[in-house]
Image (cartoon, grey):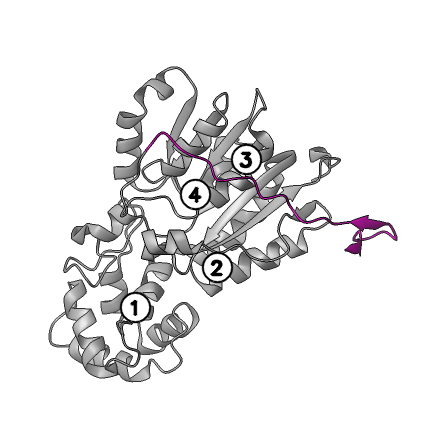
Amino acid sequence: MKKYKPGTGEKIERTEEFIPPKVELPVEFSHEHYPVMLQEVLAAFYPYREKTDATYFDGTFGRGGHYMAVKYTVPSMKATVMDQDLAAVKYGNERFKTEVENGALRIIHGNFSQFSDHNLKNFDMMLLDLGVSSPQLDQAERGFSFYHDGPLDMRMNQQQGLTAEVLVNTATEDELIRIFKEYGEVYRPARVVRAIVQDRKTKAFQTTASLAGLIERVDGWQVKGHHPATKYFMALRLAVNSELEVVAETIPAMIQALKPGGRLAVITFHSLEDRIVKNIFRDSEEFGRSVYKKVVVPSQEELDLNTRSRSAKLRVFERSAQDEQGKL
């Protein structure tokens, strides 16, 4: 397929990417903690497997699953990782103590949007997994899931002030409607919002169960197997953590932090995030290209193993090998 290079009359040839064979890893992950689209991420970073000075950045470190697998396939790499979850940072420093001490791994507490504050650049491989990690979902006290009753928290970074409880109990009716429409893609949230505003006059919403119960009572079950609170909870999480804004602001900067020939892999979990990533990659063609013509989705094997991956999508951007970083 031939395309015109933006800003020139030059035709460029675009070829489909070779998909490497599955990597057999020496590490076993539990079903609950299996890194999403792991084999697809390893395939995206396949060109660097024999690079002796490869550099890797993971902006959503979690429990280090992706990092461990990439490290196995590119053993000589040096890595810098970030996570805004204090529990993930603590776990990483304990689990990978040897790598941290010998300088092969640097762990930073913070949102990936802050990577430029640490003067981080010149990476061969960069990864963002924009989903909520299994430990966060499974811990009731984090307040991400309506399946586990806990406080209405939803903060990725436990040090920030705004929580879902504050938002639900103080936002105006119009503001809540906007949040649920824009972030949750709930087309008619007005009945639920009116019920929230009415009920919070008597008693503030403090738990996930109380809010999920109201949504279930007002909206009812529209789709079998799909809890009516799903989109509302997703909207609150995105709003509390400013996730869409962070992605839109940070992806272009991450493209600039790639070495010529480097790759940025981004895993999204709903259409709003995926649309942002798709558009940024498309609008950045003067700096490189999307590696895959179509978005990559999980294999049936992975879906059978981990149902939480069902909405995951992977897009990969490769910086032009001829690109000079100084011009950005």
Label located before the other in sequence (1 or 2): 1
* Label placed on residue 72: none
Q: Nearer the viewer, mark 3 or mark 2?
A: 3
C-alpha separation, residue under disc 3 versus residue under disc 2: 20 Å
Residue range of the region highlighted in magenta in the rendering: 1-27
Q: Specify the amino acid type for callout 2.
A: Glu
Where residue 246 appears, x then y in whole percent? 47, 52
How many C-alpha atoms fall within 10 Å of the one at disc 4: few (<14), some, or many (≥20)? some
Q: Nearer the viewer, mark 4 or mark 1?
A: 4
Question: Which secondary structure type mostly characterizes the magenta part of the structure?
Answer: loop
- Report the side of 81 relative to 139 (left or right): right
Q: Specify the amino acid type for callout 4.
A: Leu
Quarter of the figure that contains the N terminus:
bottom right
C-alpha separation, residue under disc 4 versus residue under disc 1: 25 Å
Where residue 187 appears, x then y in whole percent? 40, 80
C-alpha separation, residue under disc 3 versus residue under disc 4: 14 Å
Where residue 270 appears, x then y in whole percent? 43, 62
Element under disc 4: helix
- Give the residue displayed 30% in from the left and 42% down from the top: 85
The reply to whether the magenta stretch includes residue 20 is: yes
Q: Which residue is mark 3?
A: 125
Q: Residue furthest top?
A: 102
* Label placed on residue 273: 2
- Give the residue displayed 34% in from the left and 64% down from the top: 234
Q: Which residue is mark 4?
A: 38
Q: Nearer the viewer, mark 3 or mark 4?
A: 4
Q: Specify the amino acid type for callout 1.
A: Thr
